[in-house]
Image (spheres, rainbow, N blue to C red):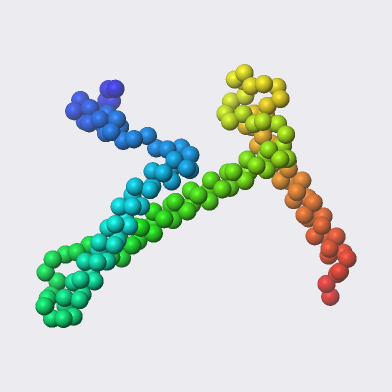
């Protein structure tokens, strides 16, 4: 790969960096699995910094330590990192649950299988919806549901008019 303006060494370094980085997982469950290791490490760091801070504070309280001689990791930073990873995992879990729910609803209310690709002419059987067709079907169902909701709201207002 020759890029104008880049030296051969920087191009090789860029290639090595691309090869060293693992591919990013595409689905939510894989992302959750990839966050378990950092979560364990973050929890360990949080507990260690809490113990070190508690020990240092107790040493100061009993008078055997006058000041802050050595720097220990800040507990609040460790805790914030831990909560950040927990929030990411929670987000991926919620997204996975929504995907499963949508797939279940699609199977229940749409009795045709949906092709997982966006392209239309890849040898898809006739009884299978393409993804664009699926999106059109879902959008029409949403608009129909909105019309029913608006009709019911209007009927409720006509039955009991407000003063």
Q: Residue at x 16, y 77 (%)?
A: 60
Q: Residue 115, percent across and down?
A: 62, 29
For the point 16% across and 75% down, the residue is 59
Q: Tell me if residue 138 can be seen.
A: no
Where in the figure is residue 137, as x and y percent of width and height?
71, 37
Name above or below for residue 54 compared with residue 125: below
Viewer-proximal residue, 77 or 29?
29
Q: Is residue 136 above or below residue 71?
A: above
Near-viewer residue (46 or 152)? 46
Could you tell me residue 81's position as x and y percent?
A: 34, 57
Residue found at x 59% / y 43%: 100
On the question of residue 11 being in view, the answer is yes
Is 160 situated left or right of 130 in this image? right
| Screen quadrant of the C terminus | bottom right
Extreme residue in the right direction: 159
Residue 153 appears left or right of 41:
right
- Residue 84, by quadrant, is bottom left
Q: In the drawing, does residue 133 fall left or right of residue 117?
A: right
Relative vertical location of residue 120 with respect to residue 160 in this rendering, above or below: above
């Amino acid at each position: 790969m020759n890029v104008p303006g880049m030296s051969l060494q920087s191009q090789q370094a860029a290639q090595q960096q691309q090869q060293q980085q693992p591919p990013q997982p595409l689905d939510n469950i894989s992302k959750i699995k990839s966050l378990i290791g950092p979560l364990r490490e973050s929890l360990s760091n949080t507990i260690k910094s809490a113990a070190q801070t508690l020990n240092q504070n107790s040493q100061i309280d009993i008078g055997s330590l006058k000041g802050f001689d050595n720097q220990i990791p800040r507990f609040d930073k460790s805790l914030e990192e831990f909560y950040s990873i927990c929030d990411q995992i929670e987000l991926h879990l919620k997204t996975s649950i929504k995907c499963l729910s949508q797939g279940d609803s699609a199977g229940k209310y749409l009795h045709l299988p949906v092709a997982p690709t966006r392209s239309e002419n890849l040898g898809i059987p006739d009884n299978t919806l393409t993804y664009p067709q699926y999106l059109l079907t879902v959008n029409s169902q949403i608009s129909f549901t909105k019309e029913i909701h608006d009709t019911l709201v209007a009927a409720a207002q006509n039955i009991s008019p407000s003063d």
